[in-house]
């Protein structure tokens, strides 16, 4: 996810938030690259979701992408799950 592809995530996240969804799960299992633009999309969504009483959960990050989050400290502000199933189970209270 970079400058050229970030809107592919930004638009659906903003749409969900505009519809009143405040707990978002992002499936990162196929995300192989994330630069500062992609990180900013996720951080912006997190701020809006938290302001509405929710949050953004990231699931299934590949090690190369997880490393970007570790280096920048972004892993400390997101709830990160090993798998999508784990993230969805937590969201449903299970």
Image (cartoon, rainbow, N blue to C red):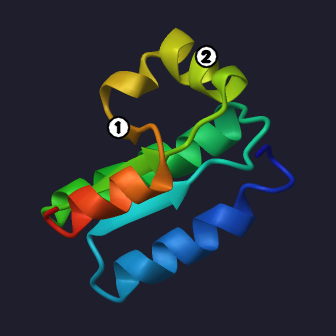
Circle 1 Cα neighbour tier, 10 Å, few/some/many (<14 / 14–19 / ≥20): some
Residue closer to the observer: 30 or 37: 30
Query: Which quadrant of the structure image shows residue 11?
Result: bottom right
Mark 2 neighbour density, 10 Å: few (under 14) some (14–19) many (20 or more) = some
> Whole-percent x and y of residue 20?
27, 84
Q: Nearer the viewer, residue 41 or 21?
A: 21
Q: Is residue 48 above or below residue 63?
A: below
Q: Secondary structure at mark 2?
A: helix
47 to the left or right of 10: left
Q: Which mark is residue 67?
A: 2
Q: Residue at x 21, y 70 (%)?
A: 92
- Number of disc labels: 2
Residue found at x 20% / y 61% = 54
Q: Which residue was labeled with disc 1?
A: 78
Give the x, y percent position of residue 13. 50, 70
Q: Residue furthest right?
A: 4
Of residues 80 and 17, the one nearer the viewer is: 80
Mark 1: secondary structure = loop
Placement of 61 over or under 14, stated as above or below: above
Q: Quick check: marks 2 and 1 in contact, CB under 8 Å?
A: no
Q: CA distance from mark 2 to mark 1?
A: 14 Å
Quadrant where the C terminus sits is bottom left
User: Where is 32 relative to 9, above or below?
Assistant: above
Q: Residue at x 24, y 63 (%)?
A: 91
Residue farthest to the top, as pictured: 71
Q: Upstream in the sequence, badge 2 or badge 1?
A: 2
24 above or below 81?
Answer: below
Residue 5 position by quadrant: bottom right
Residue at image point 35% right, 37% down: 78
């Amino acid at each position: 996810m970079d400058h050229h592809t970030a809107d592919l995530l930004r638009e659906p996240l903003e749409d969900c938030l505009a519809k009143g969804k405040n707990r978002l799960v992002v499936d990162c299992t196929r995300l192989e690259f994330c630069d500062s633009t992609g990180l900013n999309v996720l951080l912006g969504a997190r701020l809006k979701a938290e302001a509405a009483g929710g949050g953004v959960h990231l699931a299934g990050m590949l090690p190369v992408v997880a490393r970007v989050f570790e280096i920048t400290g972004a892993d400390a502000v997101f709830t990160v799950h090993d798998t999508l199933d784990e993230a969805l189970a937590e969201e449903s209270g299970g």
